[in-house]
Image (tube, rainbow, N blue to C red):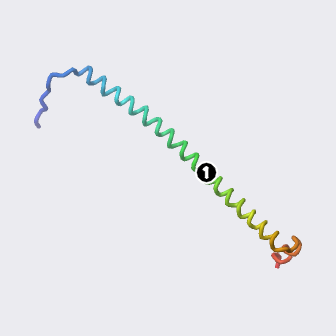
Amino acid sequence: MARRKVVERNYPELIQEAEEKIEAMSAELKQEKANLKQLKKDKIRYDAMVEKQKKQDEIQKAAELLVSSGKSLEEIEEFLSR
């Protein structure tokens, strides 16, 4: 196995730069993970809100149909119970 030739460099400085870069990337990764977690929570709440709104819209549409039918609530209940 061939050995890599070692050249003269400022190794302490290079090591410090690499460690700082890793630290910065770790902090950024931590922030992105927190952001992802929040996005997932927000999506769950948003999906629930959309579903609730959809149900409200259906209820509103049903109420409008009931009113526009001109029939009484008792007549509609009787019709639906058959």
Residue at x 62%, y 49% (from the top left corner): 45
| Percent position of residue 6, x then y | 14, 26
Q: Nearer the viewer, residue 72 or 21?
A: 72
| Percent position of residue 26, x then y | 40, 33
Decide if residue 2 is on the left or right side of residue 23: left
Residue located beneath label 1 in the image: 46
Decide if residue 54 is on the left or right side of residue 79: left
| Percent position of residue 12, x then y | 26, 20
Decide if residue 47 is on the left or right side of residue 33: right
User: Which quadrant is the C terminus positioned in?
Assistant: bottom right
Residue at x 55%, y 42% (from the top left corner): 38
Relative to 32, say whether 8 is above or below: above
Q: Quadrant of residue 60?
A: bottom right
Count how many numbered circles sit on residues in the image.
1
Decide if residue 62 is on the left or right side of residue 71: left
List the single residue furthest toward the left: 2
Residue at x 81%, y 75% (from the top left corner): 80
Q: Nearer the viewer, residue 25 or 50?
A: 50
Relative to 34, say whether 58 is above or below: below
